Image: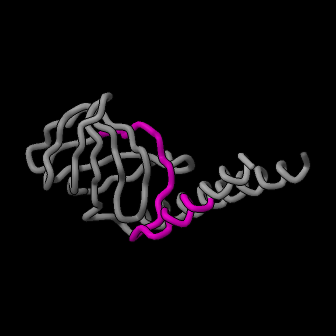
Protein backbone atom coordinates (compact mmCIF):
# COMPACT_ATOMS: atom_id res chain seq x y z
CA UNK A 1 0.00 0.00 0.00
CA UNK A 2 1.32 3.40 -0.96
CA UNK A 3 -0.03 5.23 2.12
CA UNK A 4 1.58 2.67 4.47
CA UNK A 5 4.98 3.37 2.92
CA UNK A 6 4.55 7.12 3.37
CA UNK A 7 3.58 6.67 7.03
CA UNK A 8 6.67 4.54 7.66
CA UNK A 9 8.89 7.20 6.08
CA UNK A 10 7.40 9.85 8.37
CA UNK A 11 7.99 7.72 11.47
CA UNK A 12 11.53 6.90 10.34
CA UNK A 13 12.29 10.59 9.76
CA UNK A 14 10.96 11.53 13.21
CA UNK A 15 13.16 8.87 14.86
CA UNK A 16 16.26 9.96 12.92
CA UNK A 17 15.74 13.58 13.96
CA UNK A 18 15.65 12.65 17.64
CA UNK A 19 19.15 11.11 17.42
CA UNK A 20 20.64 14.59 17.05
CA UNK A 21 22.43 16.08 20.02
CA UNK A 22 19.62 18.62 20.46
CA UNK A 23 16.08 18.31 19.12
CA UNK A 24 15.37 20.74 16.28
CA UNK A 25 12.24 22.48 15.11
CA UNK A 26 11.48 24.10 11.76
CA UNK A 27 11.94 27.86 11.99
CA UNK A 28 11.67 29.33 8.46
CA UNK A 29 11.74 33.02 9.43
CA UNK A 30 13.87 36.01 8.51
CA UNK A 31 16.58 36.91 10.97
CA UNK A 32 16.57 40.52 12.11
CA UNK A 33 20.33 40.72 11.80
CA UNK A 34 23.55 38.82 11.24
CA UNK A 35 26.64 40.80 12.24
CA UNK A 36 30.25 39.67 12.00
CA UNK A 37 32.26 39.79 15.23
CA UNK A 38 34.48 41.66 16.08
CA UNK A 39 34.25 44.26 13.28
CA UNK A 40 30.45 44.77 13.43
CA UNK A 41 30.05 44.41 9.65
CA UNK A 42 26.58 43.30 8.54
CA UNK A 43 26.68 39.85 7.00
CA UNK A 44 23.81 40.20 4.57
CA UNK A 45 20.35 38.77 5.14
CA UNK A 46 19.42 35.39 6.51
CA UNK A 47 16.47 33.06 6.84
CA UNK A 48 16.52 30.64 9.76
CA UNK A 49 15.62 27.17 8.54
CA UNK A 50 15.63 25.21 11.79
CA UNK A 51 16.40 25.92 15.42
CA UNK A 52 17.65 24.05 18.49
CA UNK A 53 19.00 25.11 21.87
CA UNK A 54 22.45 24.45 20.41
CA UNK A 55 22.20 26.51 17.24
CA UNK A 56 20.46 27.36 14.02
CA UNK A 57 20.65 26.42 10.35
CA UNK A 58 20.53 29.62 8.29
CA UNK A 59 20.27 30.39 4.59
CA UNK A 60 22.49 33.49 4.15
CA UNK A 61 22.88 35.88 1.24
CA UNK A 62 26.59 36.40 2.04
CA UNK A 63 29.33 33.83 2.43
CA UNK A 64 30.51 33.28 6.00
CA UNK A 65 33.64 31.30 6.76
CA UNK A 66 33.81 28.28 9.00
CA UNK A 67 34.85 29.46 12.48
CA UNK A 68 33.51 33.02 11.91
CA UNK A 69 31.88 34.55 14.99
CA UNK A 70 28.55 36.29 14.40
CA UNK A 71 25.90 38.07 16.39
CA UNK A 72 22.40 36.80 15.56
CA UNK A 73 19.15 38.65 16.24
CA UNK A 74 15.86 36.84 15.66
CA UNK A 75 12.37 36.54 17.10
CA UNK A 76 10.02 33.77 18.13
CA UNK A 77 6.27 34.01 17.44
CA UNK A 78 5.25 35.19 20.93
CA UNK A 79 8.45 37.08 21.82
CA UNK A 80 8.59 40.35 19.89
CA UNK A 81 11.55 41.54 21.96
CA UNK A 82 13.59 38.87 20.25
CA UNK A 83 16.71 36.88 20.94
CA UNK A 84 20.27 38.13 20.58
CA UNK A 85 23.21 35.75 20.87
CA UNK A 86 26.72 35.10 19.66
CA UNK A 87 27.27 32.07 17.44
CA UNK A 88 30.12 30.40 15.61
CA UNK A 89 29.81 29.13 12.04
CA UNK A 90 30.38 25.36 12.11
CA UNK A 91 29.88 24.56 8.42
CA UNK A 92 28.92 26.25 5.14
CA UNK A 93 27.51 24.82 1.92
CA UNK A 94 26.75 26.60 -1.36
CA UNK A 95 23.07 26.60 -2.29
CA UNK A 96 21.22 27.96 -5.32
CA UNK A 97 19.67 30.72 -3.18
CA UNK A 98 22.84 31.58 -1.21
CA UNK A 99 24.86 29.80 1.48
CA UNK A 100 23.52 27.36 4.06
CA UNK A 101 25.24 27.85 7.40
CA UNK A 102 25.25 25.81 10.58
CA UNK A 103 25.67 28.26 13.48
CA UNK A 104 26.41 27.00 17.00
CA UNK A 105 25.26 29.27 19.84
CA UNK A 106 28.16 30.20 22.11
CA UNK A 107 26.38 32.67 24.40
CA UNK A 108 22.69 32.41 25.18
CA UNK A 109 20.92 34.03 28.13
CA UNK A 110 18.85 31.71 30.33
CA UNK A 111 15.53 33.35 29.40
CA UNK A 112 16.38 33.04 25.68
CA UNK A 113 17.20 29.37 26.22
CA UNK A 114 13.82 28.81 27.92
CA UNK A 115 12.01 30.52 25.03
CA UNK A 116 13.80 28.36 22.46
CA UNK A 117 13.01 25.21 24.48
CA UNK A 118 9.34 26.26 24.60
CA UNK A 119 9.32 26.88 20.84
CA UNK A 120 10.78 23.41 20.16
CA UNK A 121 8.31 21.69 22.51
CA UNK A 122 5.35 23.49 20.92
CA UNK A 123 6.64 22.55 17.46
CA UNK A 124 6.84 18.88 18.50
CA UNK A 125 3.28 18.98 19.79
CA UNK A 126 2.03 20.55 16.57
CA UNK A 127 3.94 17.97 14.54
CA UNK A 128 2.48 15.07 16.54
CA UNK A 129 -1.02 16.50 16.25
CA UNK A 130 -0.75 16.74 12.45
CA UNK A 131 0.79 13.24 12.32
CA UNK A 132 -2.11 11.74 14.31
CA UNK A 133 -4.68 13.64 12.26
CA UNK A 134 -3.13 12.06 9.15
CA UNK A 135 -3.26 8.56 10.71
CA UNK A 136 -6.90 9.01 11.80
CA UNK A 137 -7.86 10.23 8.31
CA UNK A 138 -6.38 7.02 6.81
CA UNK A 139 -8.68 4.90 9.01
CA UNK A 140 -11.74 6.94 8.04
CA UNK A 141 -11.34 6.03 4.35
The one nearer the camera, 121 or 129, is 129
Q: Quadrant of residue 87?
A: bottom left
Identify the residue at the far right of this view.
Answer: 140
Q: Is residue 78 left or right of residue 109?
A: right
Residue 137, given in percent of the width and then of the height, sits at 84, 48
Q: Is residue 82 left or right of residue 85?
A: right
> How was the colour assigned to the protein in this rendering?
one colour
Residue 117 vertical placement versus 7 (above, below): below
Which residue occupies 56% across, 49% down? 78
The one nearer the camera, 13 or 115, is 13
Which residue occupies 30% across, 56% down? 85
Quadrant where the C terminus sits is: top right
Residue 120, given in percent of the width and then of the height, sits at 53, 60
Q: Is residue 138 left or right of residue 45?
A: right
Which residue occupies 41% across, 64% down? 53
Identify the residue at the far top of this view.
Answer: 97
Badge count: 0
Is residue 21 on the magenta stretch? yes
Residue 22, given in percent of the width and then of the height, sits at 42, 68
Identify the residue at the far front of this view.
Answer: 1
Question: What is the magenta range?
Answer: 11-33
The one nearer the camera, 48 or 6, is 6
The one nearer the camera, 36 or 59, is 59
Is residue 58 on the magenta stretch? no
Residue 83, given in percent of the width and then of the height, sits at 39, 53
Amino acid sequence: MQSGTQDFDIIHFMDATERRRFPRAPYDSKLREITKIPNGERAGKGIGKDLSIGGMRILCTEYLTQGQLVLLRFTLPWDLGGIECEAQVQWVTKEKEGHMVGAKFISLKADYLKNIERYIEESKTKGKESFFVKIISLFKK
